[in-house]
């Protein structure tokens, strides 16, 4: 009988993790409602949905990071009395978080083996190099084990998370948005690693908003909406259109880029003009943005796009060139002066550079405009709360709680709160660096709408994105950035994605794009 039970609970296709009637609430607000899900052994199981749909919360409950408010969880046929990260690892379940869990000043190898170091008599064994090399080879990654983690790019730090899960020989690996910061080649390697895990009979729970990756890689797909499961199907029975329809309750055709506002009047002087700007990582940058115009910066990772934005905003010190606001020189730039001068900059890393995770939604969204709510040295709570409610409603932030715990919000809702924070003061120039990184289709559309609303209100908008489609879909004009310099200027209505990519990779005559100027 015991042998029969073991065959049922541990054979290929049998349940690895089962969620039954799971409910999860934060601050009295349900984010999961009566979720029933089975993750089978030997499957790559994708979970898709809008930010706020509950997909990451499901992954975190399966991985032991969150405990359910109600319902039950089974792991390989057993119901653990305690379910936390330690208990999960002891039963072979590991989780890779969307927000990296890296110890910056430890080396790559120390991060990978943290907590599972091989020791003898209290001392580390000398076999860590060979152990690391074997894991790196199985993942297809090439990382120096002795480099401190803080020196690595976000993409390489993500690889540490992947290797850490593999090092623990987990039978179930929860991957929460693991490809958000990876290149196409790195994503392909990650997918190959997933397939190797599947071939070994392990289970991968793959939470992602990249629908093409989900369809290409997964065996089964669960669609979630508003904290509930819409359906679970074999991947071969789904398409991108059916996934979008299930996620949003409407067709894919309804999530195209919004119409661009009318082109700005070039008779007016540009709101922002940059001439010969140089700073660490960039040189001789020239660009301009007119009132009501959306201008894009397109370039490969490391091309200098972010450095341009930081030098304009004053976060990085310029070594040459000038910036003009409304035709007047803007010298001695700093973030504080830029805010006062009507420049907003939404940074690419919302958790480390944009939001204060120890403050509630209200504290984040009104931070830059607190002086508006102060009288006689006292903060007037009522108008501050009213303005926060207005922004929450305007962006469709969920949960719609003025004092909600922002650290528990989904990436898309955090991003909408961050953008709301920066537009509170009604700036004239808005710089958005990777405004939709790590957000789902619904949040992405709302952010795109916000970009066009800003331009329609006469603002000058600079959009920086690794997604070439996003740059071409939103912008009136786009500058191409390569090796720290402006390499050309294109009009999206007359330029396709393939041509831009060929130009950025230098596979065509650069003069073609450079002639396509405004």
Image: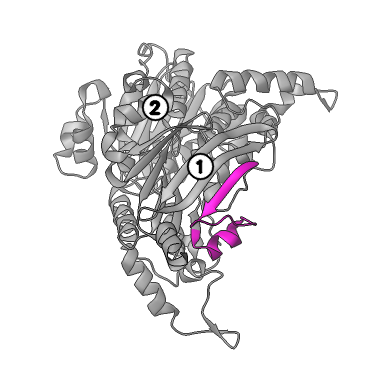
27 in magenta:
no
Image coordinates for residue 203, horizontal then vertical, percent: 40, 55
Q: Earlier in the sequence, mark 2 or mark 1?
A: 1
Name the residue tied to disc 1: 56
Q: Is any part of residue 171 visible from this angle?
A: no
The residue labelled by disc 2 is 246
Question: Is residue 107 at least partly visible in the picture?
Answer: yes
- Crowd around label 1: few <14 · some 14–19 · many ≥20 (10 Å): many
Residue closer to the observer: 203 or 146: 203
x then y, percent, for residue 86? 60, 62
Quadrant of the drawing holding the C terminus: top left
Relative height, residue 82 to residue 407 (above, below):
below
Location of residue 231 (image quadrant):
top left
Residue at 64% from the left image edge and 36% from the top image edge: 25
Image height check: is 150 above or below 508? below
Where in the figure is residue 209, as x and y percent of width and height? 40, 37
Query: Residue at position x 60%, y 48% from top?
Result: 66
User: Looking at the picture, how far across and down is residue 516, in whole percent?
Assistant: 21, 26
Alpha-carbon distance for marks 2 and 1? 17 Å
Q: Which mark is residue 317?
A: none
Q: Nearer the viewer, residue 20 or 407?
A: 20
Q: Front-most of 167 and 317?
A: 167
Question: Under tag 2, what secondary structure?
Answer: helix
Quarter of the figure with residue 373? top right
Q: Is residue 350 above or below residue 11?
A: above
The residue stretch that appears in magenta = 69-93
Q: Residues within 10 Å of mark 2 (few under 14, many from 20)?
A: many
Which of the colour schemes (rainbow, by chain, secondary structure, one colour) is used? one colour
């Amino acid at each position: 009988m015991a042998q029969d039970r073991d065959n049922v609970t541990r054979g290929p296709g049998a349940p690895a993790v089962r969620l039954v009637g799971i409910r999860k609430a934060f601050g009295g607000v349900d984010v999961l409602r009566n979720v029933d899900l089975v993750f089978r052994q030997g499957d790559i199981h994708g979970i898709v949905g809008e930010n706020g749909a509950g997909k990451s919360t499901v992954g975190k409950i399966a991985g032991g990071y969150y405990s359910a408010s109600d319902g039950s969880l089974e792991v390989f046929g057993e119901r653990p009395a305690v379910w936390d990260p330690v208990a999960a690892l002891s039963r072979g379940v590991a989780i890779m978080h969307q927000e990296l869990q890296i110890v910056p000043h430890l080396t790559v190898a120390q991060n990978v083996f943290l907590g599972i170091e091989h020791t003898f008599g209290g001392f580390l064994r000398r076999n860590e190099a060979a152990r690391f090399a074997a894991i790196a080879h199985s993942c297809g990654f090439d990382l120096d084990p002795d480099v401190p983690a803080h020196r690595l790019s976000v993409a390489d730090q993500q690889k540490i998370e992947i290797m850490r899960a593999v090092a623990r020989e987990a039978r179930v690996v929860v991957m929460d948005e693991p490809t958000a910061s990876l290149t196409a080649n790195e994503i392909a390697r990650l997918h190959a690693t997933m397939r190797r895990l599947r071939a070994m009979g392990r289970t991968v729970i793959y939470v992602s908003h990249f629908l093409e990756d989900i369809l290409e890689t997964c065996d089964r797909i669960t669609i979630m909406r508003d904290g509930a499961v819409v359906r679970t199907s074999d991947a071969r029975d789904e398409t991108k259109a059916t996934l979008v329809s299930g996620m949003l309750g409407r067709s894919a055709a309804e999530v195209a880029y919004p119409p661009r506002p009318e082109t700005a009047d070039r008779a007016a002087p540009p709101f922002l003009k940059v001439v010969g700007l140089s700073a660490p990582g960039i040189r001789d940058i020239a660009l301009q943005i007119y009132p009501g115009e959306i201008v894009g910066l397109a370039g490969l990772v490391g091309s200098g796009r972010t450095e341009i934005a930081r030098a304009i905003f004053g976060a990085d010190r310029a070594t040459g060139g000038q910036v003009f606001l409304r035709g007047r020189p803007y010298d001695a730039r700093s973030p504080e002066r830029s805010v006062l001068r009507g420049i907003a900059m939404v940074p690419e890393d919302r958790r480390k550079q944009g939001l204060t995770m120890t403050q509630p939604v209200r504290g984040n969204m009104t931070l830059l405009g607190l002086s508006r709510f102060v009288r006689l040295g006292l903060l007037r709570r009522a108008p501050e709360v009213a303005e926060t409610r207005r922004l929450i409603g305007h962006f469709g932030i969920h949960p719609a709680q003025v004092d909600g715990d922002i650290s528990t919000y989904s990436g898309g809702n955090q991003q909408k709160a961050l953008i709301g924070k920066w537009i509170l003061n009604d700036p004239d120039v808005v710089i958005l660096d990777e405004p939709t990184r790590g957000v789902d289709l619904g949040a992405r559309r709302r952010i795109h709408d916000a970009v066009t609303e800003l331009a329609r209100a006469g603002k000058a908008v600079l959009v920086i994105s690794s997604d070439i489609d996003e740059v071409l879909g939103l912008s009136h004009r786009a500058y191409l950035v390569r090796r720290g310099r402006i390499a050309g200027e294109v009009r999206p209505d007359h330029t396709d994605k393939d041509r831009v990519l060929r130009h950025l990779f230098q596979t065509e005559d650069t003069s073609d794009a450079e002639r396509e100027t405004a």
